[in-house]
Image: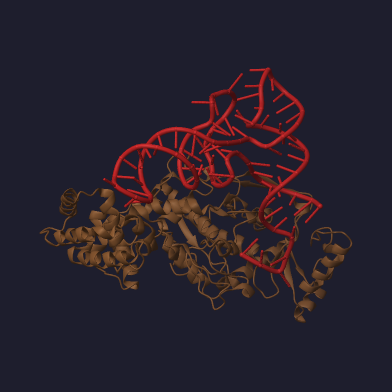
Amino acid sequence: MNQPRVRFAPSPTGALHIGGVRTALYNYLLAKKLKGTFVLRIEDTDQTRYVPGAEAYIQASLEWCGLIPDEGPSYGGAFGPYRQSERKDIYAGYVQQLLDKGWAYYAFDTAEELEAIREAEHAKGNQGFKYDATVRLQLKNSLTMSKEAAEALIASGHPWTVRLKVPADEVVVVEDLIRGAVAFQTNELDDKVLLKSDGMPTYHLANIVDDHLMKITHVIRGEEWLSSTGHHVLLYRAFGWEETMPAFAHLPLILKPDGKGKLSKRDGKRLGIPVFPLSWESDNPEDAFVGFKETGFDPAAVINFLALLGWNSGTEQEIFSLDELIDAFSLEKIGKSGARFDFDKAKWFNEQYIKGKDNAVLAAQLMPLAKERSYRADLPFLEQFCGLMKERVTFYQDFFEEGYYFFEDVHTYDLATVQKKWKPERRAAMDVLRDSLTQLPDFTHEAIKKAVESFMESAQLKFGDVLPILRIAVSGTMKGPAIFEMMELLGKEEIVKRLSAAFDVFDQNV
RNA sequence: GGCCCGUUCGUCUAGGGGUUAGGACGCAGGAUUUUCAUUCCUGUAACACGGGUUCGAUUCCCGUACGGGCUACCA
């Protein structure tokens, strides 16, 4: 009867931060674990902070990660609309309920007036002015004036808000699934604005109403919400919905890789690491940044990394597919303290995922990148190329950045090694080797190896004399896959061409 | 300032009244690979501090310190 329903409710005020992705992930995992529903709800009640494109970005990010909502603005569902800005009328009715029950009141103090009071109080040494039970009877609201006066003020067009009337001298206890019981003294809680003067609800009101209407059973959100959960419980009580109130779980935050505080967009720029799933374009270069995707991450690796940042299965398993995560997931295993963002670990996960992939799968994935660079877009070729490269790359881009010589001429030779290994007096012998390769009927790595070995014997040379030369002639560098296999993949014609060209270069540089 | 949350290797963490405090990343060394990388092995390194409770605390309690969050007509 109690169908689990879980929601991810971001605000479209910019790109979805990696911490937001993790919140979405945990929501998704719990929903799937409980065979429930994963809802995406867009909390766009602040018109001043709305950023065009942010909602699309959020959706694209979730989809890239494989966290597909079951319900949401563009996924349909029986509990819509899923954008709060489209639910304005719904909230109005609930605000009226609260007003009628005496749980809320009209407040006529403007934001400017309150700001002035705050400043004055601050000057007097009171750093924490709150609009609460101790001061509400001294302020301009429907509690301090007659019903007629209040109505007249509203009719006159004076701006007004609706505030929650927090009861005095009570204790509200939140049972957090991660932290246990957390108690709040109502005397510490302020009379939160529920309905703003522009007619939009605040987060607090919209959130409670929507979670109730959408039959949400579990609220999993960042720790920054823990302090307002006392208000939220009060709101459930005010509406008479305490029986069906969702369970709460407040997630620890993701912290900066260095220094203090939570991870921010700035850290990505400062440290040259991605902190968002996808790139974000902006006219202002200060606001633009590259994402995990564009850095060359596999989404499964990002998900795996994020899942283990603050959660663990209790086993020693580190690599988890999304399905395995669903299977192993439980809220109780989520840690309580903030987790530092560790980019080295993220890279390690990506390496594991790339290495673990089938060459054919990898080749298909790399195809678009190859085309982008106008590289040879030949699936069987790419497949073998992946087999040779996948154990030495971190990002998808590395395949082409480090293995460019599989697609174009060598542009840089490791001359330091050339100077050590290239003996001009052996040029004639090396030409003989090159020509002997031309004669090979099957240009396989076994045949090449055999040919090189017999050459070394007749020329009285050792591997150390010949292999580095071949390697640099073919790829320009001492790093890379097995030399004979590289030669086989590149083909006889190309190899002979490269050897001739390289030997000339070597002669000139010794 | 007030309220709330937290604190095990550099980092992510397991554990839990008596353990050689385990794993992973990173780092260092070695083996294999006549390159690089992979793989494998080894090493490095932690219970914030002070009081209790207890035969015994890293584990339970209380303080302190430190870190984090909130303290808006932002979410």
Q: Quadrant of the C terminus of chain A?
A: bottom left
Relative placement, left or right, of A101 versus A142 is left
In which quadrant of the rendered view does residue A414 lie?
bottom left
Q: Position of residue A201 (x, y in %)?
A: 65, 69
Q: Is residue B74 above or below residue B15?
A: below
Please identify which colour was used for chain A in the image: brown
Near-viewer residue (A321 or A81) = A321
Q: Position of residue A209 (x, y in %)?
A: 60, 62
Near-viewer residue (A271 or A485) = A485
* Residue located farthest toward the right when viewing the structure as drawn: A124
Near-viewer residue (B46 or A162) = B46
Relative placement, left or right, of A11 versus A294 is right
Q: Residue drawn at (48%, 50%), measured in percent from left and top?
A: A345
Near-viewer residue (A435 or B75) = A435
* Residue located farthest toward the bottom when viewing the structure as drawn: A156
In which quadrant of the rendered view does residue A71 lie?
bottom left
Chain rendered red: B
- Residue A159 in sight in this render: yes
